[in-house]
Image: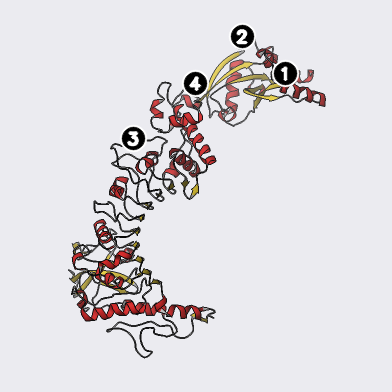
């Protein structure tokens, strides 16, 4: 079995980092096993069980984060901080920490990887130009200010060091060498390494007097809460103002305790990808101005309620979570209404909070959008793209809204918004957005009977405000409302009247005016058959002409006529309305549409549900045209 295998130990196999969660036998197999949880959960096979027996629990919620490996499987080599620093930044075989013939390390498996010889790419020697100067600068470790050592398999302290609260002489020599090697480091990235004890981070940072930014993404620390009292050098972390703890699988209590105990001057915190679903009452430092909680499992604004106590917060990123409601279990819908939450959410964030990112969530109802200014009164910049709301919303008449239409409605619902999805909300954009939103409300009002408008307007909180700004919208109600899926909605009502020239050809007892109803899908051939039977005329001699309500101008020849028309149009002092109508009729004629016999449906010729149709007979049309 591997030496010093213990619960919580960090290992790397073939570049894949894991944490030992179990050491022992597995039923149905021979020998000992190491139950490990992989940092990349897709690398595993199960959540810690085999043959129906649970052997260990994974911190990740992914069902494939765990697997078993044999203890004799050789792990990847480990490095100390200084070894990793030397391997990453010292070049051309120059060891910045040791004489040329010495290889740093304190035991088997420790080595420094130094590049020797030319660089080959696809079997060809790559020519390097200008890199000598860069190497010389980087090899001067004393001048390094930004250090990135992610994925370097760093494990700073031996087990004997971790077992003691005080490092003793050996630890003093270690931290002294860190101070002498790179004293100017201000930004340090130690992500995805083999740290398992917070003391390792504390001891490294204690000697970096200029450290201001620290990234620890992808590490897995054990016993963070229980080990607080034993960690020395915590005062040295007070200098750090930017901290990243993404993908560490810390629970909220651990994040709050770490930041409040060690990082008293923190202004920016990144805690994304930690599968957090609820913010507990444990507080973060009040100095925070930027907070990133992307890629977690929040579903409602009430899940982050304690963050409202942060007085100086200015930017909050909640991107790629599962937000879909304000609080409680309100149903999600994509209609235009502001559904009232079943429970009241009386929490208000600091007015200093001006920038919020809700993109890539599960927001699907407009009430969430309308509530944002109540919860975030200082919000002036919002990102909310890539939510179902902007893919499924429809206008009151059932048409699918485009994403740009949805963004316009968002801007109209949030009057203090100055930036939406990284685009400035200009005065012109707001004017167009608010008038468009008001027209949608008017269209929704038109769908309810008179006297019930309040049922619509109460769901749109800015309706009265917008009416004062732009005036009451025009509500155009149809004369009758019915179910669009009903039989009545599928019928067309036609008022037939026989043209004067055709009446002479009809028999004396034939009706000159009558009304028939047909399905809109009925072919014109069939309509001609019904009309012919009613008039007792051969259907193919009948010509149907739809008399529309539209008027077309009469074209006149000659320049003098055109001048007269222009003069008539410019004369706006006509007091006699009847005379005006007569003049208009002289210049305009009703537009007629000939319904051509064929298999085309009558409903595709006539768009309305009721129309006037003139009936002419082929012979009468022939005679009238010959007389002209």
Residue 36 lies, in percent from the top left, at: 25, 68
The residue mark sitting in front, 2 or 1, is 1
Q: Secondary structure at mark 2?
A: loop
Residue, disc 2? 509
Circle 4 Cα neighbour tier, 10 Å, few/some/many (<14 / 14–19 / ≥20)? few
Report whether residue 55 is seen.
Answer: no
Q: Is residue 378 above or below residue 231?
A: above
Sequence-first tag of 2 and 3: 3
Residue 390 lies, in percent from the top left, at: 44, 44
Mark carried by residue 586 = 1
Q: Residue at x 23, y 76 (%)?
A: 71
Residue, disc 3? 340
Q: Is residue 406 left or right of residue 16?
A: right
Q: Secondary structure at mark 3?
A: loop
The residue mark sitting in front, 3 or 1, is 3
Could you tell me if the residues under marks 2 and 4 are in contact, i.e. CB atoms within 8 Å?
no
Q: Secondary structure at mark 4?
A: loop
Residue 131 lies, in percent from the top left, at: 51, 79
Q: Is residue 8 left or right of residue 622?
A: left
Residue, disc 4? 479
In this orientation, which residue lies closer to the viewer: 223 or 558? Answer: 223
Circle 2 Cα neighbour tier, 10 Å, few/some/many (<14 / 14–19 / ≥20)? few
Sequence-first tag of 1 and 4: 4
């Amino acid at each position: 079995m591997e030496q010093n295998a213990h619960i919580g130990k960090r290992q790397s196999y073939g570049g894949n980092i894991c944490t030992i969660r179990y050491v022992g036998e597995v039923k149905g197999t021979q020998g000992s096993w190491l139950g490990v949880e992989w940092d990349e959960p897709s690398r595993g096979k199960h959540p810690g069980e085999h043959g129906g027996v649970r052997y260990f629990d994974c911190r990740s919620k992914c069902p494939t984060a765990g697997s078993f490996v044999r203890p004799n499987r050789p792990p990847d080599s480990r490095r100390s901080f200084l070894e990793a620093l030397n391997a990453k930044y010292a070049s051309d075989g120059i060891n910045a920490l040791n004489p040329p013939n010495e290889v740093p390390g304190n035991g088997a498996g420790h080595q420094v990887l130094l590049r020797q010889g030319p660089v080959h790419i696809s079997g060809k020697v790559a020519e390097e130009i200008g890199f000598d100067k860069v190497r010389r600068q980087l090899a001067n470790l004393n001048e390094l200010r930004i250090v990135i050592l992610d994925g370097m398999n760093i494990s700073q302290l031996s087990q004997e060091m971790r077992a003691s609260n005080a490092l003793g002489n050996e630890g003093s020599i270690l931290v002294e060498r860190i101070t002498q090697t790179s004293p100017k480091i201000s930004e340090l990235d130690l992500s995805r390494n083999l740290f398992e004890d917070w003391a390792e981070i504390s001891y490294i940072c204690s000697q970096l007097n200029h450290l201001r930014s620290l990234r620890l993404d992808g590490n897995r620390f054990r016993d963070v809460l229980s080990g607080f009292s034993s960690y020395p050098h915590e005062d040295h972390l007070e200098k750090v103002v930017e901290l990243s703890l993404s993908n560490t699988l810390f629970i909220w209590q651990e994040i709050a305790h770490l930041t409040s105990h060690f990082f008293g001057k923190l202004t920016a915190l990144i805690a994304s990808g930690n599968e957090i679903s609820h913010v507990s009452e444990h507080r973060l430092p009040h100095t925070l101005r930027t907070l990133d909680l992307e890629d977690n499992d929040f579903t409602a604004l009430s899940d982050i309620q304690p963050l409202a106590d942060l007085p100086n917060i200015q930017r909050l990123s909640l991107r790629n979570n599962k937000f879909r409601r304000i609080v409680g279990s309100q149903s999600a819908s994509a209609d235009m209404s502001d559904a009232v939450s079943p429970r009241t959410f009386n929490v208000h964030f600091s007015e200093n909070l001006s920038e919020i990112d809700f993109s890539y969530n599960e927001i699907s109802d407009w009430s969430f959008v309308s509530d944002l200014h109540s919860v975030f009164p200082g919000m002036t910049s919002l990102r909310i793209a890539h939510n179902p709301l902007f893919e499924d919303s429809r206008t009151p008449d059932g048409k699918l809204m485009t994403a740009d239409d949805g963004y316009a409605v968002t801007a109209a619902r949030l009057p203090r918004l100055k930036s939406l999805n990284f685009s400035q909300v200009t005065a012109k954009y707001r004017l167009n957005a608010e008038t468009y939103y008001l027209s949608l409300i008017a269209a929704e009002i038109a769908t309810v009977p008179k006297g019930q408008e309040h049922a619509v307007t109460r769901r749109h909180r800015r309706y009265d405000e917008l009416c004062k700004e732009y005036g009451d919208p025009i509500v155009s109600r149809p004369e009758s409302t019915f179910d669009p899926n009903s039989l009545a909605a599928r019928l067309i009502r036609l008022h037939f009247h026989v043209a004067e020239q055709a009446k002479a050809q009809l028999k004396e007892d034939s009706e000159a005016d009558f009304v028939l109803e047909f399905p809109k899908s009925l072919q014109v051939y069939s309509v001609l058959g019904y009309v012919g039977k009613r008039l007792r005329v051969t259907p193919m001699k009948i010509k149907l002409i739809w008399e529309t309500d539209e008027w077309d101008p009469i074209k006149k020849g000659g320049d003098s006529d055109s001048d007269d028309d222009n003069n008539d149009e410019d004369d706006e002092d006509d007091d006699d309305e009847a005379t005006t109508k007569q003049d208009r009729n002289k210049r305009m004629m009703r537009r007629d549409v000939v319904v051509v016999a064929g298999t085309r449906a009558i409903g595709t010729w006539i768009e309305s549900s009721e129309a006037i149709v003139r009936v002419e007979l082929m012979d009468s049309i022939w005679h009238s045209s010959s007389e002209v």
